[in-house]
Image (cartoon, rainbow, N blue to C red):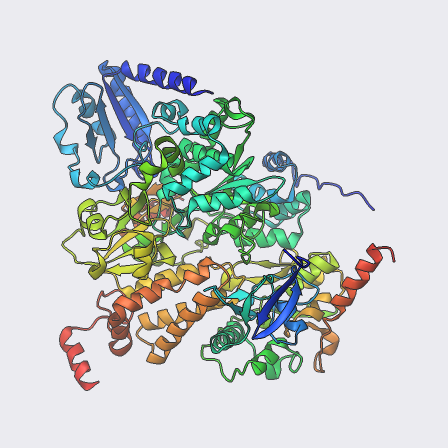
């Protein structure tokens, strides 16, 4: 190999881009102002490739790949938007809306919800399938926060931020399949769990599933950007600067 | 252990057997055990002592024909004429024993020449012929020769070359070339490497792996050990379903025996190569058949798959290079090394080499386990080996590939069985379940059955599989109830496409297959449910209408 | 940093020593979680909250993770077992041979849905995804005993016997 081996050149949506070998397609696309929708991905957390919204087409591969975990390769030709991908993304959003009970107008996250804004940006106008409305509980046992499982999309951001960043691993997922649910400790009420009350999970929750009691009835924006800052600061402190 | 020592053990076993005029093998597979073959064996043993005959009564693994259990195979030392008795009760012990020097017990004889004709036993060569818990009996039938040969005469690369040349492909369903997989793991760099045997046979309607583990566990251990030598692994895991207690206990006993004989553990056969195997119990999750989910499960986590790449061959168990093959794949290894790649490649079709074990079940006369050379037409399997559909009913479809596969109708019965051919008709090889359906099965209901399976087995990680299977199940139920519209059918077809192409792992990607294949060949049944609230098989809640009423509806429509 | 201390055995029930033995054999590593839960399940018949808590603390696994694992796998049960269990296999081969009729008949006789137990805790009606005895389909497990080629009447008799004897 001639030039520095850790630089790769590839094509995303017809644009020639270069990237470090350890970068993902999603990172490179965003650096180049190419928008790929995401939901389970969040800068500062590990990636799980679960929401399938960031799927992209790679020339020569029959399989669609999640761009959040797909590493760049030399000469790759990636398409991030096509009629097919658009249709798949819309249907996935429909499945998410219909899975539980997402009624934006009566939701605490109305106007600040990532699911809602994805619905808008991806041109979703209606949901073709019946809402499943599983009648899940709302746990308000915590002194500061509420979890409404009816609005959870199981993106597991709360699980990851609690385990990876806060280091408490209070959240996890129980059950399987359509019956999966996020839990604290042994499915204990949140307020009686070993929660550290840091509130990171609420900030990273993309919907109204986790909310701050003090914001009920008012606008409830969330600020997940703290994660990247935290990452930089922790790195700095590890390096003793 | 050297090859001379192996031969010595074999000779001892043969000498021991020569003391007897008859061998009376009692099937102690799960099927026959459920018919109390253990009590039958005790009765036969007692009777052998009482009668004073020189007769050796022993337990063996599965003889294949589970429907006629309990099975007893009488093998006279001085004649080639083996007798297979079926439906043998404890009370028949005296009669069987006294018939040894006289005429066979006619009423217990199975007349199943067709059943065995056309079968070719490689994986099952010892099933029903050895006591699965005695390693020496395995050795007496050429067991462990391949391992000794590989360790003392071959370098790892030439072992891989042999496997590649044999054309063996993964028997778990995907059909990935085994040699290629081994080569990738061998080339991967890691402080440690692992070999995992996937015995999480989750396909409902399949029991090949169970049977191999119960009948000939040493064969799997030998295959894993040869694989470990070839790829440079030092540690192995056998992941077996907890629902298979007999398989687990026999495998546990066999691992102990293999260690005792120096065929497992440190410095195997006096060489520098060390390898050992631990058993891990599956805990009831179909998705753990998927490589990365299985790895998560061995690591003590929820059995959820992760995106590939990286593949386990590069980064598997605890991030280290890991080879995962299925039970049946490992069971093929020793014979290939022993008899040569060319011999194996001479069996089967152009791209699908060797034999395949199938669990033949459903509406078929001879239910049980069969092993056939690849390329055999489905018709021969169903009608000759299987003996056709019983009770004078009409054949409708044969389902292969489990919840990931499809239903193959009459018109494709002349299809030779191979990985490619099955995919071409909208099904797949899968792990080897083959379920025959007659006209009392409703194909929409069958599709609904599999969708319910996928829905309850979905791990819940990715949304298309988690919610998509639930929505599709809802639509299929609506169709079965006669309450669906054409718009529902359109949505179902659309969801099939989305779930197939956007799911994270193989479970979701293949979950729509049973719907797609039944839509391809039996769309009229879907339309009958939707347009006429008519289920021709009479199993769905929508009811059945007679021909005159249907014709009248057709006219008005 | 305060030292981490192992939790004491929940009681002097001898079975806890078996459970502890499994963990010790695996060096109390986190990945022994499933193996240990298997031991609890086979020793006690189910996993209660105290057991999951004890195992999680001993292996230093987060509580929620242990609960997540225990509820992911269908082999683990979080409820105390009934006196008797009738498990009908609903694998494909059994389904084709009418396992659904067996389930319906049992549900009717016991007045409970599959997956539930009778209110007196006498009989649990369960379904299984293939027990690998397809050659003898349809199959049921009467407690632990596998019964093949079963007819609805035969199954109902068994249920009746359990009902009367207790």
B62 displayed left or right of B221: left
Which image quadrant for residue B82? top left
Residue that lies at the very extreme toward the front in this rendered image: A2
Which of the two residues, B58 or C144, is positioned nearer the viewer here? Answer: B58
Image point (23%, 52%), residue name: B378
Residue B155: percent from left, percent from top? 49, 32
Q: Is residue C83 visible?
A: no
* Residue drawn at 58 percent across, 47 percent down: B300
Q: Residue at x 34, y 66 (%)?
A: B516
Give the side of residue B32 with respect to residue C76, left or right. Answer: left
Residue B154: x and y in percent read: 46, 30
User: Please, is residue B390 above or below residue B530 in the view?
Assistant: above
Q: Quadrant of residue B112?
A: top left
Along the viewing direction, whichever of B483 and B367 lies nearer the viewer = B367
Instruction: Give the answer, above or below, for where B290 lies relative to A69.
Output: above
Corner quadrant of residue B552: bottom left
Question: On the rendered structure, is B95 left or right of C4?
Answer: left
Give the x, y percent position of residue C91: 35, 52
Report whether residue A211 is seen: yes
- Residue B355, given in percent of the width and then of the height, sits at 31, 43
Question: Against C113, is C26 above or below?
Answer: above
- Which residue is painted at 22% across and 85% down in the image? B557
């Amino acid at each position: 190999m001639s030039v520095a081996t850790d630089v790769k050149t590839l094509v995303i949506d017809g644009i020639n881009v270069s990237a470090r070998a350890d970068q993902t397609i999603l990172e490179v696309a965003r650096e180049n102002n190419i928008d790929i929708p995401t939901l389970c991905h969040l800068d500062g957390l590990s990636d799980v490739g679960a929401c399938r919204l960031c799927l992209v087409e790679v020339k020569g591969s029959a399989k669609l790949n999640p761009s959040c975990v797909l590493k760049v390769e030399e000469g790759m030709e990636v398409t991030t938007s096509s009629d097919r991908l658009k249709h798949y993304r819309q249907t996935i959003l429909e499945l998410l809306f219909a899975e539980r009970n997402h009624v934006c107008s009566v939701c605490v996250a109305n106007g600040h919800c990532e699911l809602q804004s994805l619905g808008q940006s991806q041109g979703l106008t209606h949901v073709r399938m019946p809402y499943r409305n599983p009648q899940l509980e709302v746990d308000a046992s915590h002194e500061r926060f509420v979890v409404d499982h009816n609005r959870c999309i199981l993106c597991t951001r709360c699980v990851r931020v609690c385990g990876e960043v806060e280091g408490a691993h209070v959240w996890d997922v129980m059950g399987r399949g359509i019956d999966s649910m996020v839990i604290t400790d042994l499915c204990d009420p949140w307020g009686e769990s070993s929660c550290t009350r840091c509130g990171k999970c609420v900030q990273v929750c993309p919907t109204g599933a986790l909310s701050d009691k003090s914001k009920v009835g008012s606008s409830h924006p969330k600020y997940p950007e703290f994660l990247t800052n935290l990452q930089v600061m922790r790195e700095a402190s590890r390096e003793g600067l | 252990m050297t090859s001379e020592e192996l031969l010595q053990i074999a000779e001892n076993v043969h000498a021991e057997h020569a003391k007897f005029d008859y061998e009376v093998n009692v099937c102690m597979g799960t099927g026959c055990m459920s018919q109390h073959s253990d009590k039958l064996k005790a009765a036969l043993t007692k009777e052998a002592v009482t009668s004073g005959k020189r007769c050796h009564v022993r337990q063996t693994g599965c003889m294949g024909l589970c429907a006629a259990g309990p099975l007893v195979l009488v093998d006279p030392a001085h004649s080639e004429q083996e007798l297979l008795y079926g439906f043998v009760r404890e009370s028949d012990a005296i009669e069987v024993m006294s018939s040894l020097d006289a005429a066979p017990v006619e009423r217990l004889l199975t007349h199943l020449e067709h059943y065995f004709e056309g079968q070719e036993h490689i994986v099952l060569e010892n099933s029903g012929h050895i006591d699965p818990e005695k390693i020496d009996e395995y050795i007496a039938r050429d067991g462990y020769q391949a391992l000794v040969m590989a360790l003392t005469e071959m370098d790892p690369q030439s072992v891989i070359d042999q496997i590649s040349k044999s054309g063996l492909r993964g028997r778990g369903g995907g059909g990935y070339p085994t040699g290629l997989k081994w080569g990738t793991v061998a080339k991967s760099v890691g402080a440690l490497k692992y070999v995992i045997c996937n015995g999480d046979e989750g396909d409902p309607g399949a029991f090949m792996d169970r049977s191999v583990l119960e009948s000939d566990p040493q064969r799997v251990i030998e295959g894993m050990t040869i694989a470990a030598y070839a790829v440079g692994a030092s540690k192995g895991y056998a992941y077996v379903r907890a629902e298979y207690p007999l398989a687990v206990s026999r495998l546990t006993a066999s691992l102990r025996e293999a260690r005792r004989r120096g065929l497992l553990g440190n410095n195997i056969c006096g060489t520098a190569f060390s390898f050992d195997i631990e058993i891990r119990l599956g805990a009831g999750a179909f998705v753990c058949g998927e490589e990365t989910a299985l790895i998560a499960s061995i690591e003590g986590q929820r059995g959820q798959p992760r995106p590939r790449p990286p593949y386990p061959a590069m980064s598997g168990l605890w991030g280290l290079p890991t080879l995962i093959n299925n039970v049946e794949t490992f069971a093929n290894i020793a014979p290939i090394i022993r008899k040569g790649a060319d011999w194996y490649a001479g069996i089967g079709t152009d791209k699908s080499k060797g034999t395949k074990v199938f669990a033949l079940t459903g509406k078929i006369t001879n239910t049980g386990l069969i092993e056939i050379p690849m390329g055999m037409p489905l018709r021969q399997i169903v009608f000759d080996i299987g003996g056709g559909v019983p009770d004078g009913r009409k054949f409708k479809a044969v389902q292969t590939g489990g919840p990931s596969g499809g239903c193959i109708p009459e018109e494709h019965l002349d299809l030779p069985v191979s990985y490619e051919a099955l995919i071409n008709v909208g099904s797949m090889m899968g792990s080897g379940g083959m379920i025959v359906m007659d006209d009392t099965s409703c194909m929409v209901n069958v599709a609904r059955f599999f969708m319910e399976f996928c829905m309850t087995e979905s791990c819940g990680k990715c949304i298309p599989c988690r919610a998509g299977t639930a929505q599709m199940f809802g639509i299929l139920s609506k169709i079965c109830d006669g309450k669906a519209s054409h718009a529902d059918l359109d949505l179902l077809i659309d969801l099939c496409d989305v779930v197939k192409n956007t799911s994270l792992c193989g479970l979701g990607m293949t979950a729509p297959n049973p719907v797609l294949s039944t839509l391809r060949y039996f769309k009229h049944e879907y339309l009958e449910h939707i347009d006429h609230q008519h289920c021709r098989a009479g199993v769905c809640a929508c009811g059945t209408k007679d021909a005159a009423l249907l014709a009248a509806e057709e006219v008005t429509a | 940093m305060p030292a981490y201390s192992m939790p004491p055995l929940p009681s002097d029930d001898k079975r806890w020593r078996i459970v502890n033995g499994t963990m010790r054999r695996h060096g109390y590593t986190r990945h022994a979680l499933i193996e240990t839960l298997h031991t609890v399940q086979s020793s006690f018949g189910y996993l209660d909250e105290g057991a999951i808590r004890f195992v999680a603390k001993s292996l230093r696994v987060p509580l929620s993770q242990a609960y997540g694992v225990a509820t992911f796998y269908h082999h683990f049960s979080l409820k105390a077992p009934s006196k008797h269990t009738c498990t009908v296999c609903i694998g494909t081969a059994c389904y084709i041979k009418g396992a659904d009729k067996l389930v319906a008949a049992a549900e009717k006789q016991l007045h409970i849905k599959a997956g539930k137990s009778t209110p007196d805790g006498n009989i649990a009606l369960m379904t299984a995804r293939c027990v690998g005895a397809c050659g003898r389909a349809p199959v049921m497990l009467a407690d632990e005993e596998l019964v093949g080629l079963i007819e609805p009447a035969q199954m109902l008799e068994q249920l009746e016997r359990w009902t009367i004897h207790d």
